[in-house]
Image (cartoon, grey):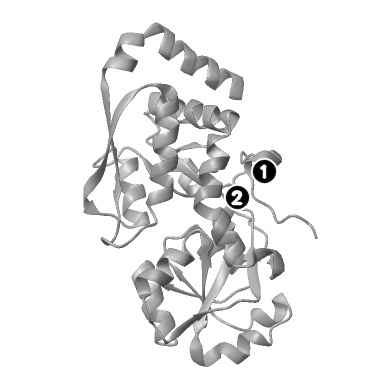
Amino acid sequence: MRYFITFCIYSILFIFPSFTYSAVWTIHYPKALTDDDKRNEYPLAVLTLALDKTGVRYKLIPSDKTLNQGKAVRQLKENRDINVFWGMTDKEREDGLLPIRIPYDKGLIGWRVLLTREEDEQNFDRLTSLRSLLRYTAVQGKDWPDTKILQSNGFNVKTTDGFNGAYKALRKGEGDFFPRSVIEVTAELKSLGNDSALRLDDKLVLQYPAASYFFVNKSNLTLAKLIDIGLRRAIESGEFDNLFNNYFGGVITDLGLAERQIFRLSNPIMPKESPINNASLWFEIEPK
């Protein structure tokens, strides 16, 4: 299948060279939720790298309105307002959209550190097993695939209307901890400033197989193929790994992932087509 896709892309570039290289592709993506929300920076950098590797001319333009994950998926399904979305995959998303099955985050979205309330520090410091953590309630957005993953592993989950709602629920004590990926947590803590009510646990990390993909509308085969070939070229050249390490190498070290106790979870909603057997596409802690 991979070779078929590659063949199709090269066919497009060969048969329609004047269109591919002279036309300007206008690509709309979901606008960030707030002005200081930096979570789009890395996916945009990867998408830019991939498109640059194809040689196409393009413009990346944010949507006019902010879109949470659920609404962005619906808009893309209906081919309205946006024509690319990035986020964590699951079977439901892959049924409704066309995924480019290269995890642009190398699966780092599935490495989760815990935000808790300052007053609960001692409770979490004493945890030594996954069973003991299951006594506490996690906070997650109701549209997030992570919610289903945590529930399937036995967690009670307080769901909210998204990112801001999850932080509010944690502060109010409606849940006990908010698992955040190592991709997200550093920037989020900076944006929160001196929020003395919350703390980042420094001993535990949850890990489950997960992938963040670029998605397009099912009818947009050409854009999907272009992104796919661009990503593969960036991987082959080493630029993909360089970009990943530039963004997250320091974060991985600063969070001390190699020194944390890892609680491994299963992911029953990980689509069977996921390239989990290709170790070069995934981040993993080096054994000591």
**Residue shown at the point (59%, 67%) measured from the top left:** 255
Any part of residue 1 in sight: no
Query: CA separation, marks 2 and 1?
Result: 10 Å
- Would you place residue 9 above or below residue 282 in this image? above
Percent across and percent down for residue 208 are 64, 59
Task: Look at the image and tell me in which quarter the C terminus lies.
Answer: bottom right
- Percent from the top left, x then y, of residue 272? 64, 42
Q: Secondary structure at mark 2?
A: loop
Taking the spot 61% from the left edge, 41% from the top edge, the residue there is: 274
> Can the viewer see residue 256?
yes
* 206 sits left or right of 86 in the view: right
Residue drawn at the location 37% of the way across and 28% of the way down: 220
Q: Is there a contact, CB below 8 Å, between mark 2 and mark 1? A: yes
Residue picked out by circle 2: 270
Disc 1 residue type (three-letter) = Ile
Residue placed under numbered mark 1 in the picture: 276
Residue type at mark 2 is Met
Q: Secondary structure at mark 1?
A: loop
- Count every numbered label the image shows and give the total: 2
Q: Quick one: label 2, few (<14), some, or many (20+) residues within 10 Å? A: some
Residue furthest out toward the left: 64
Residue furthest top as drawn: 15
Residue 116 pos. (x, y %): 51, 81
Hey, which quadrant is residue 163 in on the image? bottom left
- Towards the viewer: 130 or 280: 280
In this view of the protein, which residue sits in the foreground, 281 or 287?
287
Q: Which image quadrant: the N terminus?
A: top right
Please name whichever residue, 1 or 284, is drawn nearer the observer in this view of the structure: 284
Sequence-wise first label, 2 or 1:
2
| Circle nearer the viewer, 2 or 1 | 1
* Residue positioned 61% across, 76% down in the render: 202
Residue 65 % position (x, y):
21, 53
